[in-house]
Image (cartoon, rainbow, N blue to C red):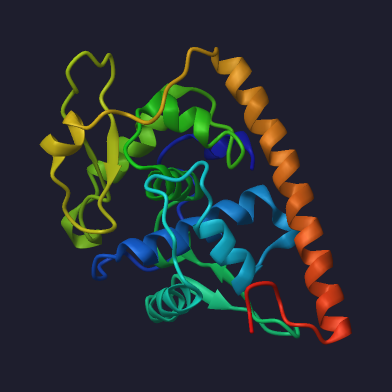
Amino acid sequence: MTSDLQTPSAGRPRGHDFQQRPLSAAEARVLATLMEKARTVPDSYPLTLNALVTGCNQKSSREPVMNLADAAVLEALDALRGLHMVLEGSGSRVTRYEHNFARAVGVPDQSAVLLGMLMLRGPQTAGELRLNTERWYKFLDIASVDGFLEELQDRSADKGGPLVVKLPRAPGAREQRWAHLLCGPVDATALAAAPSTQGSAATEDELIALTRRLATLENTVAALQDQLQNLNEQLGLSQPGQP
């Protein structure tokens, strides 16, 4: 993406304003996982059901950690298709799924990135969001992250209302965290009091380097999963975990 998209008012898609029902926890996880993999493993995207279930149930970079069954993911996908947030691909022997979040909700790509990360990893500060989304989109600075978050918080009622909320400062914390509202209103006081799962003694540069190494490893794993799936299809074997 070009640098002219770094202002909060730029790059706004011509989609529908989001005035839908709140998402369930499973729907939010499925949607955010599709959003993540579209950015981090584009060669394996759109995702098969197996890859999507694996991504939803990752033990790392997830808050909370979930254990969704295939049936629960399929139910969430069906509901998200009804909200125009997920599309089902064609032209492949295996059904694949992709998200349509930015257009369905009516937000620019940068705002969609921030909402996706909040759905995946829970409340975070602007600094944590800039670091955690580095593999998705490179924000110029924390101020630009704050700008998009404030725009999402100030979203007018005729467009569906706010999509994020800034939580009260937690005791001993230097910065306030943000939470998404895609699953409905949140208890801001309770979330503010909950300990953050983010943060590290490492420097930002060190953490960015680690996220890049993780991206390389995820790309390799995704490519191997695709190769295994194609081999199973050619041999007429069922996928691992399937009867």
Answer with left or right where residue 66 lies relative to residue 208: left
**Percent x, y for residue 89?**
64, 79
Rendered image quadrant of residue 106: bottom left
Q: Quadrant of the C terminus?
A: bottom right
Q: Residue at x 63, y 79 (%)?
A: 242
Q: Judge whether 72 appears above or below 182 on screen.
A: below
The number of discs equals 0
Q: Residue at x 46, y 35 (%)?
A: 7
**Percent x, y for residue 152?**
30, 45
Q: Which one is nearer the viewer's eye here, 242 or 219?
A: 242
Rendered image quadrant of residue 198: top left
Q: Residue at x 58, y 22 (%)?
A: 207
Q: Judge whether 85 appears above or below 114 on screen.
A: below
Could you tell me if residue 215 is visible in this image?
yes
**Percent x, y for residue 27?**
38, 66
Could you tell me if residue 13 is visible in this image?
no
Q: Which one is nearer the viewer's eye here, 218 or 16?
A: 218
**Percent x, y for residue 65?**
42, 50
Answer with left or right where residue 37 lies relative to residue 145: right
Answer with left or right where residue 167 lies relative to residue 88: left
Q: Residue at x 41, y 56 (%)?
A: 66
Q: Quadrant of the N terminus?
A: top right
Q: Which one is nearer the viewer's eye here, 8 or 183?
A: 183
